[in-house]
Image: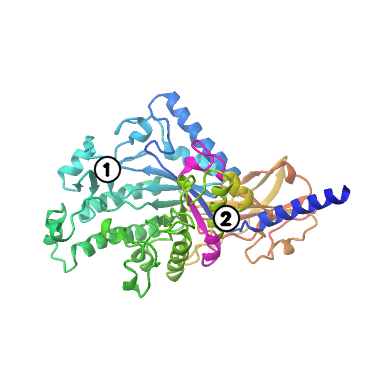
Amino acid sequence: MKKQLLLLLLTAVSAVGNMRAESPKREFRSVWMAAMGIDWPLTAGTDSISREAARAELIAYLDSYKEHNFTGVCIHVRPLADALYKSSYEPWSASVSGKRGVDPGWDPLAFAVSECHKRGLECYAWVNPFRIDHNGKLPDTPQDIDWRSRGLTFTQGTWTVFNPGVPEAREHCMKVIEEIYTNYKIDGLLFDDYFYPGVGMPKGDAESTAPDYKLWKDSKTTMSIADWRRNNVNTFVKELYDRIQKARPDMRFGIGPAGVGGKGAPAYGLEGPGVADDWMYDDIYCDPLAWLSDGSVDFIAPQIYWGRTHTYSPFSPLCKWWADMAGHFGRHNYVSMASYRVDADDFGGNNATGWEEFAAQVRECRAEARDAAPGQIYYSAKFIDGPVRTGLGSHLAGNVYGRPALVPVVDWKEHPVYDAPKDVATSGSSLRWTPVPADSKAIMRYSVYAVPQGVPMDEACKDGDGIDARYLLGVSYEPEYVLPADRVDGYKYAVCAYDGYGYESRPGVYDPSASHNAAVK
């Protein structure tokens, strides 16, 4: 009996060790959190009851992501040329107040940033750059009427968008986005795959009926109308990226295109993925390889929303192709994965089979990632651990997200070098230190480690990326961290300045058993 118990214990320890080994120190783990009544807020209104309900919804999400070792969330803040924040340019979103243009009486983005950072989670603003409406209803707020009167928009079928071919329209969208990253301490900015309307845009002989045909003709360009449209999108993306680099270069910017790309690959001497068709190239005039080629994104987040056994668009070759493309151009690939399809045949259902399909996809992301920069973003929030489905987040934490993680390093930009945090010490069950001086616009947080007393610090730093991942407790945006109950005694502690580029400073160390503590060289 004793031998059997010992064998069971050793098996359990081995399983935990394997699970931990599958949890790298660097990985982007996030969630698409959609507005418009999809994920958050589910409760809209202007009264205090609605406000508190919406806040409670977000807190429940964030507590779950913190528990399951995610690194952040991507929150929908501008779904339809409207705002889930205080905007100088666009009307309040019906997603939060219940009616477009009506002030809800609170600032959802400010609340989201604060609550994310309290938990050491990154907060990304998810923005639709051009979409205004997709239900055939022209919004009637003063701003909407003004945009139409000035020719900044066009309608095709049921879709109304800002016209990417009109410089003034692009500038309006640019100012909207600049205001977001100027007024809010977001950690990143994310677009999804809405550019030109994909449905009903005339092609071939019918192109002359397109709402932007005259604009194209008047431009006197030698480009085809399709190339002109793609160039309009590319021009917007590149100009936005350049502005971000001047204002907040440590804030990451990425785009989540459709999961199948590659039609434009020959222009870059590359080949497509060899599976499925790239509809977005000639439907929404989206060429992700152009953004990668000219360095106008920090990461790509392709929506590979299929399982590995899908017959038409299998996950594996697409995951490899996108990783190769991002690596070829020296950028990161954070794969968008379809938590909303957990019940589909190619996933297996909201059970251990379906959850393990996602864990297997995570492993493939890691295997294909270049420069130790794997990443995943799940669409959407409500299918991970509530309120529509539960279980996926727990399975990921128990199998592939066994430890907290830091995000991959953006190593192609110049970056400041910070000193180690000073005066690290415990106060009761909290660890505290002196804040590291940094520019007020810079992203600054801290990575916190607990190293067992029997492990020398030089031994704890042997993985080539600072302190080993096994000792990482988490991240704090404040110069304080509440220690878990099982890490209060028998440990020495290390704190690193951890910037928006993902770099860590030398650690400031506190050893309760030593008379002198200092930064590790």
Residue 343, percent from left and from top: 48, 44
Please name the residue shown 65% across and 57% down the image.
469
Where is residue 103? Give x, y as percent. 34, 31
Colouring:
rainbow
* Left or right: 514 in relation to 163: right
In this view, the mark in front (2 or 1): 1
Q: Quadrant of residue 90?
A: top left
The furthest residue to the bottom: 269
Q: Are marks 2 and 1 in contact (CB under 8 Å)?
A: no
**Lower sequence index among marks 2 and 1:** 1
How far, Cα to Cα, is label 2 from label 1? 37 Å
- Is residue 70 or residue 47 the one in the foreground? 70
Relative to 84, is 160 on the left or the right? left
Asked if residue 389 is among those painted magenta in the image, a careful observer would answer yes
The magenta segment is 364-392
Secondary structure beneath dot 1 equals: loop
Question: In this orientation, does residue 69 appear?
Answer: no
Q: Secondary structure at mark 2?
A: loop
Quarter the C terminus occupies: bottom right
